Image (cartoon, helix red, strand yellow):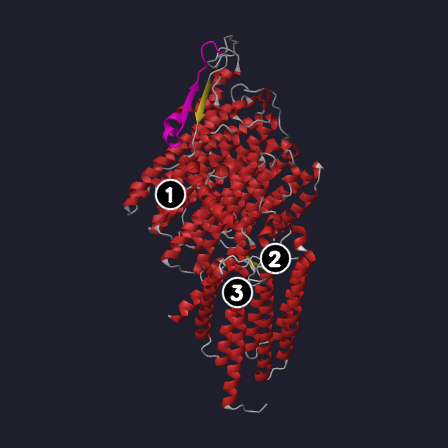
Amino acid sequence: MLIAAALSALLALAVLGVVAGAEMWRHRLVYFCCMIASLALLLSGVKHLGQTPGTGPAIVLPIGLPWMAAHFRLDNLSALFMVVVNLASAAASAYGIGYCSHLPEPRRVTPFYPLFLFGMNAVLIADDAFMFLVAWEFMSLASWLLVLADHKNAENRRAAFIYLVMACFGTFCLLTCFGLMAGGEGGYSFPAMRAARLEPVAGFLVVLMALLGAGSKAGLVPLHAWLPLAHPAAPSHVSALMSGVMTKVALYGLIRILFDLHAQVQWAWGAAIMVIGGITAVLGVLYAILQDDLKKLLAYSTVENIGVAVIGLGLAIAFKASGEKTLAALALVAGLYHMVNHSLFKTLWFLSAGAVITATGQRDLGKLGGLAKRMPWNGVAALVGAVAIAALPPLNGFVSEWLIFQSLFKGPSLPHWAMKFGVPVVGAMLALAAALAAACFVRAYGIVFLGRPRSREAAEAHQVPLTMRWTVAFLALLCVVLGAIPVTVTDALSHVVTPLTGVQFAVSADLGWPWLSPVSSTRGSYSGTVLVMTGVALCAITLMLVRAFGTTRLRRADAWDCGHQEDIPESQYTGQSFSQPLRRVFCSSLFSVRESVDMPEPGDNRPAELQVRVVDPVWVGLYANIGRVVDFFADLVNRIQFLTVRRYLLMMFTTLVFMLLVVAVRQSR
Amino acid sequence: MAASPSLLGEQFSYDLAHLIGATVLMAGFQLLYQRRLFAVLNTFAFQALALAAAAAWQAHIQHAPHLYVTAVIALVFKALIVPFALHWLVEKLGIHKNVETAMSIGWTMMAGVALVALSILLVLPVTANAAALTRESLALAMSVVLLGLLMMITRHNAVTQVVGFMALENGLILAAVSAKGMPLVVEISVAFSVLVAMTLFGIFFFRIRERFDTLDLADLETYRGDRE
């Protein structure tokens, strides 16, 4: 009931957004109501997760196609994702209250924002393929309109176009996937699909199409091309939702199909998905390191984190198909945990990026710096987020990556040789990605928030409105909390995965609260709770010792100048220089990175220039070629448009005669 | 009419219907090899006359008086009004009196023969269960339709294209009257006549020649905005 009320409220808010006009308080009201609606949805999600037997009542509404009613149902999986989606939505909406007045054209954003929230939530509760796809398209189109919000920028228009093409492609694949699962009888409701048994070929196609459809939305390599273009183009609170949440909705679709609707997936698919996840993680973070645009960096980091979560999903599929249900549950819990975490810290970082852009008008790393002093709230919150993304204990990012590693370590116990050899490779990829992610966020945080301002705008940055500061602080707090009580989280996730893997499983079973001991207590255990408490205790003891025994005498000494003697900001490390070693080591062959120095002649007083050329292998190798082929055929078809009337008649005539010939030949046989 | 027609009577009605249908088809061929515009119009009038005869004969043997209406429409409208109107149009607008062909007449005739063969091959096996009369007439009618289409695509001039379209329509009506118990025959013929009339009026009222100095459709395309 609460869900229905909140969803219809979101639809009504879209109308309100249209009539909001130039009055800023009306826009604020819309965002405030969006926050309330998100909180209501969050509450119902949490409430549902609390109950043990997992399936809510099915609701059938007489809307949609005339012969098909719309089915809705909330089960544990949808409830979990509802929590994920609405936690971030509530934060982004609260952020929007303050942020909307800083947008160039708030009227282009406010009406579509509630629709976007509505679409994402509707995907989660849909219980038939038709509603699922409609809601999915709703989500895609609403976010597309939000990407187009700043349409005067040609780059944004291009991003929106590519996004639209990819969204159409993804939905087309999902449509095929559901069509195959529905079979000839057209059982489009999810219970009918669960009951159906598919032919091997159809099953293969279902998994492939689901992977292409949901994967293109989630940003799996090589379908990620639109993501780093579209996510940064939207206003920051929408970027936060697209990156932090919409990708999760895509993964929800993947989990729903591969674990629930079409549950007989072969282990080889699990291996393939795992490898795709590994490649996505490594490539995503390498891309991220090369970026100088803060929001693009974050978008590529999203690609990386999706890859990490997908490794967990692939492993779970492989384990489940091999009969190792407990391990499947572990891998799935790890993957889901990572999704929850990523939705928090990526939302946090995008909202921080929005605050930085509001305060300075810059998103180029080369123009920022020293903001921790001027925007202390954002500085601290972004630091927490960076530590979480870099997967350092005791924050939440560490727990989920640790769990994924734990399940990877059990991979070689599988009977297949491909898995025995493949799992260590993927483990190495994951380790590389985790280390590079840490480097990437040291760079992002260090360049943006530390050092000295690199431009006048950064030097004159001002604090952002209160709601924009509170929300990031709140998200940072959640990152700490989810890291500190991992057992509570994994227990909740165990409820979710039980119906999907068919086994009752608790990560903490061996040692009990608050220890996570995924495989057995001897192989590895971790307790964020204990770690946090120890850390706090150690800090307190150190502080007391320092206060008790430290000297209070005043000392005078030269301040350390951090290595640059002259007081000019240009002498500090820049984003480019920080990433140069990594660029040279990892990217010279993969991205064909070429550096060239343009030295002026002696006597010429222009500055020397260092040029870096980066080629995106996926874009050049795949998308550019597809574009060329499409152009070629479009040209061919285009010629038909300029024929004479007589030629059109001739075409119709020859078609007719040809058809008649076919009929004549067929019947004479 | 006798309650049970004799065998001879049945054979005779079949032969006559066949003859009239074949006359319509022959007129269709004749349309293809005319080089003068007025000759095309005269041939078309002759075809319409034959069609009227076919409809009337079918009305007689099928005991379907409503087909007489079709026959009258064909006679009055197609055999008289339309040819005269077109005559008048051609005179009034000073259209070239030559037929401009896009394909040489010999080849057109051969294509026509091939089309007739195709329609016979096609219709006869499909309608194996129908009455012999219906089968033959359907094959003839389909040939007429295809010849009309062929005429539309092998002639440049707008008037000949209209004539081709009307020949095509004659074929449809021939098919409609030949099949026993076909509903809405009269309505179909009325509707087509209205369509043709509107086309003619269109040609007249737009006075294509005044604007573009020709009725050749190729010259219309420059005004469609597609071509430079």
**Mark 2: amino acid:** His
Residue at (63%, 49%) from the top-left corner?
A11
Q: Which mark is residue A274?
A: 1
Question: How far, Cα to Cα, is label 3 from label 2?
Answer: 18 Å
Q: Nearer the viewer, mark 1 or mark 2?
A: 2
Q: Chain ID for label 1? A: A
Image location of residue B134, percent across then percent down: 51, 78
Q: Nearer the viewer, mark 3 or mark 2?
A: 2
Image location of residue A609, percent across then percent down: 47, 19
Q: Nearer the viewer, mark 3 or mark 1?
A: 3
Residue A108 highlighted magenta (yes or no): no
Q: Chain ID for label 3? A: B
Q: Report the number of discs.
A: 3
**Mark 1: amino acid:** Met
Q: Which residue is mark 2?
A: B96
Q: Is residue A604 left or right of residue B195?
A: left
What stretch of residues is rendered in magenta? Answer: A583-604
